[in-house]
Amino acid sequence: MTRWKSFTVETRREAVDALSHFFTEHGALGMAYDERLFGPEGDPADPLPPPEEVTRLTAYFPWEADLHSVKQEFLDFLPVLAESFGAEAGSFVSAAEITDFGWAEKWKENFKPRRLGRRITVKPSWEPYAPSPGEVVLTIDPGQAFGTGTHETTRMCLQFLEEAFDAAPLPLRVLDFGTGTGILGIAAARLGASCAVGIDVDPKAVEVAGENARINGVEDRFYAATTPLSCMEGRYDLVLANVLAEILIDLKQEITARMERGGWLVLSGILAEKSDWVEKEYETAGCRLAGKKEDGQWAALLLRREGTAP
């Protein structure tokens, strides 16, 4: 028997991914939301009705989690959420203690090795996997911090990461802003970066990223810290930022200040309808578009800073 805590909110359906990201960053081990696609007898409706605009999202936390702090962080996050999804993007519903008799192991069945790019495959630690020649396998466990490759935003980042490493010159110094599990920085190190730095406001994420670097054999080339972006020194050949569009805009100057001339920039966590806005804002900061991807409601941008490296 295992004991857990749950935290339930009501949100607009299009904000589910953003809130899932938020709760994962604050220690959630899993999420569930109501699809509401069943008929009156409990069987799947045929034809499927259009999904309702509002749904309930429940995040599951370990027993020791402080849900009072989570609630305050959630309430503080609502204005940011409202900028993207409207004034009624989220509201608190309930928090509860639950007793579980199998979910803690059952959810692992859904996580299998997944090929996410031409070379990169992500797998959990409990799944054996025999890589093919040239394949880069990352061992990242879900439920520790945000970023296991299953989310569209992370997947597109990894694909753009491969493109940057296929170009010349090789990006040797990499900065991963909002590192989460460290998956992007660790992937950069595995692809050939000599130094990759991951920064995150969450000390737990930094701890997890450091452990994942050790598991993946790149602790000599990747490290994580809670250093604010504004306090970072030096410039990088490649900067990665997988956060909401509004945060990318607010931090535009700080992010581009960390880029070498001619360096690469991967931006994700952007709702597709806001990608043009982000692109134009970064164009004013001297970054030109080199690639764009869309997956579901999300978009990612690959940009390059104008000029040549000294």
Image (spheres, helix red, strand yellow):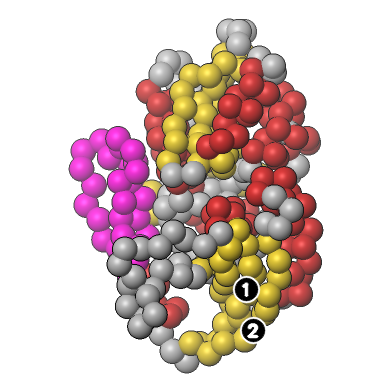
Give the magenta part as a residue range. 109-137
Q: Which residue is mark 1?
A: 8
| 62 to 143, vertically: above or below | below
Residue that appears at 62% across and 53% down? 206
Three-letter amino acid code of the residue under disc 2: Ala
Q: Quarter-wise, where is residue 303 in the image?
A: top right
Q: Residue at x 42, y 53 (%)?
A: 150
User: Split into 4 quadrants, where in the image is the C terminus?
Assistant: top right
Depth check, front residue: 217 or 42: 42
Query: Residue 201's x, y, as percent?
Result: 71, 51
145 vs 36, nearest the viewer: 36
Say if 131 sits above or below 256 in the image.
below
Q: Is residue 209 left or right of residue 86?
A: left
| Residue identified by numbered label 2 | 96
C-alpha gap between disc 2 and disc 1:
9 Å
- Give the residue type at disc 1: Thr
Q: Is residue 183 visible?
A: yes
Residue at 67% x, 79% y: name it. 95
Does residue 127 show up magenta in the picture?
yes
Density class for disc 2 (Cα within 10 Å; few <14, some 14-19, many ≥20) is: few
